[in-house]
Amino acid sequence: MVDESADKPVELTFEEQLAAARAFAMRSLARRESAESELARRLRQQGYQEEVIEAVVDYCRGYNWVNDERYGAMAVRAGAAKGHGPIKIRFELRRKGLDDNQIDAAFEQPELDWFELALALLARRANVADLADFKLRMKWLKYLLGRGFTQEQGRYALSALQEREL
């Protein structure tokens, strides 16, 4: 005798899906901080219904387990520590689903001086003797722009590093 019920997928009730999705969200948030949209995306990838996803995100927001403002501030500090500039970090935060007001709030950290961060990155990477050559200066400026620093910050870092040599 063949058991035909084994071939059919088991349908979970809304409450069972909600419990499983909450457990998944807690495991996911225990590993690392996430934005609300990131958590929702991971829940979608697991195959949960939109109603369940909304309920779980609201539940996590209610307990302050997921907080876009906190996530934004943490991501700005982490990006700066990696040597990324404000343009690149802004782009990443938008990609993660934060709105412009949340991103602006995340960048309001007085301990971050983007000009000095660009200078420190350039000082670690560039040979000061290279900065005498125009083409190499432009190469290092392009490097800083590629890391997400502004033109003004890159030019400041180049001139400050050249002045240190003198």
Image: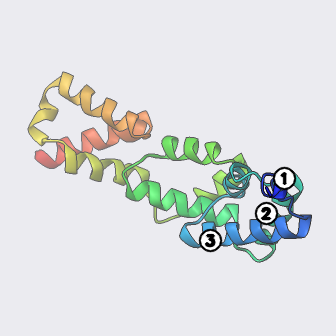
Query: In screen coordinates, is 47 left or right of 82?
Result: right
- Residue at (71% x, 52% y) in the render: 37
**Count of marks, rendered view:** 3
Q: 79 or 65: which is nearer to us?
A: 65
Residue type at the position of mark 2 = Val
Residue that label 2 marks: 57
Answer yes or no: is residue 66 visible: no
- Residue 98 spot, x, y in % from top left: 69, 50
Q: Do the residues labelled 2 and 1 touch (CB within 8 Å)?
A: no
Q: How far apart are marks 1 and 3 (CA)?
A: 19 Å
Q: Is residue 139 above or below residue 72?
A: above
Please state, as top left, top right, bottom left or bottom right, where the N terminus lies in the image.
bottom right
Please state, as top left, top right, bottom left or bottom right, where the C terminus lies in the image.
top left
Q: 91 or 145: which is nearer to us?
A: 91
Residue type at the position of mark 1 = Gln
The furthest residue to the front: 1
Q: Do the residues labelled 1 and 3 touch (CB within 8 Å)?
A: no
**Sequence-first tag of 3 and 2:** 3
- Residue 89 spot, x, y in % from top left: 52, 47
- Residue at (69% x, 49% y) in the render: 45
Residue that label 1 marks: 49
Q: 81 or 33: which is nearer to us?
A: 33
Residue that label 3 marks: 27
Query: In screen coordinates, is 113 left or right of 98?
Result: left
Q: Distance between the residues labelled 3 and 2?
A: 14 Å
